[in-house]
Image: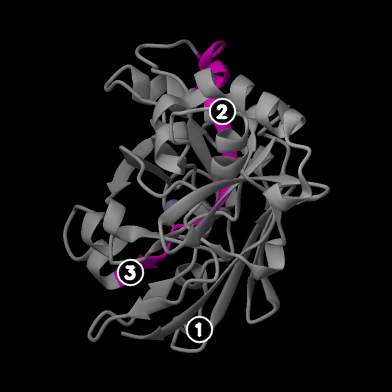
Amino acid sequence: MRLTTYQTGDGNQLGIVTERGILDVAAAAAAAGVQRSITPDAVYGRGNAVLGRLRMLAESATDAALYLNEADLTYGPAVPNPGKILCVGLNYQKHAAETGATPPDEPVLFSKFNNSIAAPNEVIPLQGDWTRVDYESELGVVIGATARNVSVDDALDYVLGYCNMNDLSERRLQMLSGQWLLGKTLDKFLPLGPYVVTADEVPDPQNLAIKGWLNGELRQSSNTADMIFTVAEVIAYASKVMTLSPGDVISTGTPEGVIMGMEDKVWLKAGDEYSVEVEGLGRLVNRMVEA
Ligand code: ZN
């Protein structure tokens, strides 16, 4: 199943991508006599436990009026309000090499906050002094069940689905101290979407092409097979330290091709457009603007 979030005057709405168009889940639920409101927050907050009911709704929605034309919709962030945003640094062999870093022995985990969440096609404000802005195409993981101290073998059972992410980064702030946080969590610096593709449709998250384009020029082209720590290893590792909850998201690191790794560093500027495409997850496009 392919979920999406779109915006109306009433806020973020959940949609399911179908051959007939985007199913308006709230309207389909109302038509089926479901009392509970089915918003993106409600669904991601409950996780895998509600996917079966969503599938049933999609199968029983026969009225053509319940389907919307995707081209007419304004996307919201694929997961609008994650409880936690974890990111993995230096998690691709060739990316670690281009930054001059020794490949880490343990996953390098850091976080962003919800102010960094942005929607597909939403403009990204570039702020005043913070001009060394870089892109990072990443495979995003949405947690679907409470995970505490899970094994690597079981870890993927706790995944609801996957989405594109762009872990935008301001390199001066990132390197200003030993703590990357500030350079990572500027407003709107984590666009994600347009879809959350449920885990059953992504049988092997370690064999997905991952690509990124700056103004149409291919800048990043790799495969999630190059990850140093797999999705399962990252989940298992994080869950030994903290409880992961439904609706948490993990951005699993970027492959080589970032601006930081280039000899001539031409940072992102207003008007630039970056597109991220992880195989099977659609395309995430965002344009930079002056704040
Ligand atoms: Zn990153």
Q: Which mark is residue 264?
A: 1
Task: Give the percent coordinates (x, y) of residue 226.
Answer: 64, 42
Going from N to C along the chain, the mark reached first, 3 or 2, is: 2
Furthest residue toward right: 19
User: Image height check: is 288 above or below 137?
Assistant: below
Nearer to the camera, 212 or 118: 118
**CB atoms at circles 3 and 2 under 8 Å apart?**
no
**Could you say which quadrant of the image residue 153 lies in?**
top right
Q: Is residue 34 left or right of residue 199?
A: left
Residue 172 place in picture, x, y as percent:
27, 72
Could you tell me which residue is drawn at 49 percent across and 73 percent down?
Answer: 259
Rendered location of residue 114, percent (x, y): 29, 52
Q: CA distance from mark 3 to mark 2?
A: 51 Å
Nearer mark to the viewer, of 3 and 2: 2
Instruction: Identify the residue position indicated by label 2 in the image.
Output: 33
Q: Is residue 38 left or right of residue 146?
A: right
Mark sitting earlier along the chain (1/3): 3
Residue drawn 35% across and 14% down? 148
Circle nearer the viewer, 2 or 1:
2
Q: Nearer the viewer, residue 184 or 29?
A: 29
Q: Which residue is mark 3?
A: 171
Residue at 53%, 23% in the rendered image:
50
Q: Provide the residue span drawn in magenta.
A: 152-171
Do callouts 1 and 3 mark residues in contact (Cβ within 8 Å)? no
Question: Picture quarter containing residue 41?
Answer: top left
Q: Secondary structure at mark 3?
A: helix
Crowding near pointer 1: few (<14 within 10 Å), some, many (20+)?
few
Q: Looking at the picture, which amino acid does disc 1 mark?
A: Asp
The quadrant of the picture occupied by the N terminus is top right
Q: Is the residue under label 1 in contact with that under label 2 (CB below 8 Å)?
A: no
- Residue 37 seen from this side: yes
